[in-house]
């Protein structure tokens, strides 16, 4: 039975990688909701320029970053794409614990969850010119600073998996093999 006063919040993203803008939204959800659920979208995709990291690597980045931020109570759920918008919400619902509110700025995600009767909360964009997955991946490939835009724990995971080299290789800019 669901408690009518209870609000559990869902954030869905690809988190390629999880950055400080995501962390701000997570902090907001943790303040506003009883339970925090994070869906790791496009979970089946990795090793591409737009989606360099595996679901497992993203899981590690997010869980370490949240623990480092003293957020301990959360569910992290990988969600694979189904490429059929009409049943996307049911698919998500089948994968995650019950939730009442969805936090997203994506117009299609907003529409799909609203049509399904969910409360949708648009969160403000924090420092979007820098806190953007696309911009951070561009910086990694270009050899510019990117560490300042992600939680420290995320940078550590990316270093451990040699993530920047992976991305540069995918972009055709890696070091030539010996
Ligand atoms: P990409 O550029 O790869 O699409 P992204 O930074 O947009 O990466 P996503 O994983 O696509 O990150 O976004 C997940 C969710 O986080 C979306 O709802 C998005 O609007 C939100 N979000 C992304 N960046 C910010 C930010 N700087 N401030 C607040 N919310 C953000
Ligand atoms: Mg995005």
Image (spheres, rainbow, N blue to C red):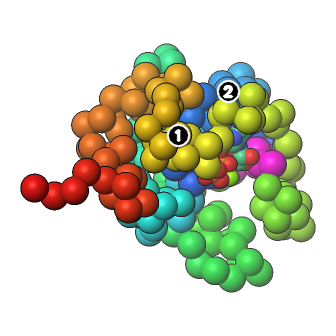
At which x and y percent is residue 84? Answer: 68, 82
Dot 1 corresponds to which residue?
Answer: 139
Instruction: State how many labels appear.
Output: 2
Residue 55 in view here: no
88 left or right of 110 in image: left
Residue occupying image coordinates x 10% and y 55%: 178
Choose between 38 and 127: the one closer to the eye. Answer: 127
Where residue 27 sits: x, y (%)? Answer: 66, 25
Label 2, secondary structure: give it.
Answer: helix
Q: Which mark is residue 15?
A: none
Asked whether residue 139 appears in the rendered view, the answer is yes
**Is the C-beta of the residue carrying label 2 under 8 Å from the nearest atom of ligand 1?**
yes
Span colored in magenta: 99-105
Mark 1 falls on what kind of element?
Answer: helix
Q: Is residue 55 left or right of residue 85?
A: left
Residue at (55%, 46%) from the top-left corner? 138
Residue 24's disc number: 2
């Amino acid at each position: 039975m669901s408690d009518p006063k209870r609000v559990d919040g869902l954030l869905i993203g690809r988190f390629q990688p999880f950055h400080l803008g995501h962390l701000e939204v997570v902090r907001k959800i943790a303040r506003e909701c009883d339970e925090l659920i994070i869906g790791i979208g496009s979970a089946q995709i990795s090793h591409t320029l737009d989606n360099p990291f595996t679901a497992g690597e993203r899981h590690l980045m997010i869980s370490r970053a949240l623990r480092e931020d003293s957020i301990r109570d959360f569910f992290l759920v990988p969600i694979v794409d189904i490429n059929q918008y009409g049943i996307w919400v049911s698919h998500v619902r089948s994968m995650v614990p019950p939730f009442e509110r969805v936090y997203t700025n994506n117009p299609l995600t907003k529409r799909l969850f609203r049509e399904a009767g969910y409360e949708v909360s648009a969160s403000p964009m924090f420092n979007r010119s820098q806190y953007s997955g696309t911009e951070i991946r561009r910086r990694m490939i270009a050899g510019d600073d990117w560490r300042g835009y992600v939680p420290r724990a995320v940078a550590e995971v990316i270093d451990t998996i040699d993530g920047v080299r992976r991305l540069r290789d995918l972009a055709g800019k890696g070091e030539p093999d010996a």
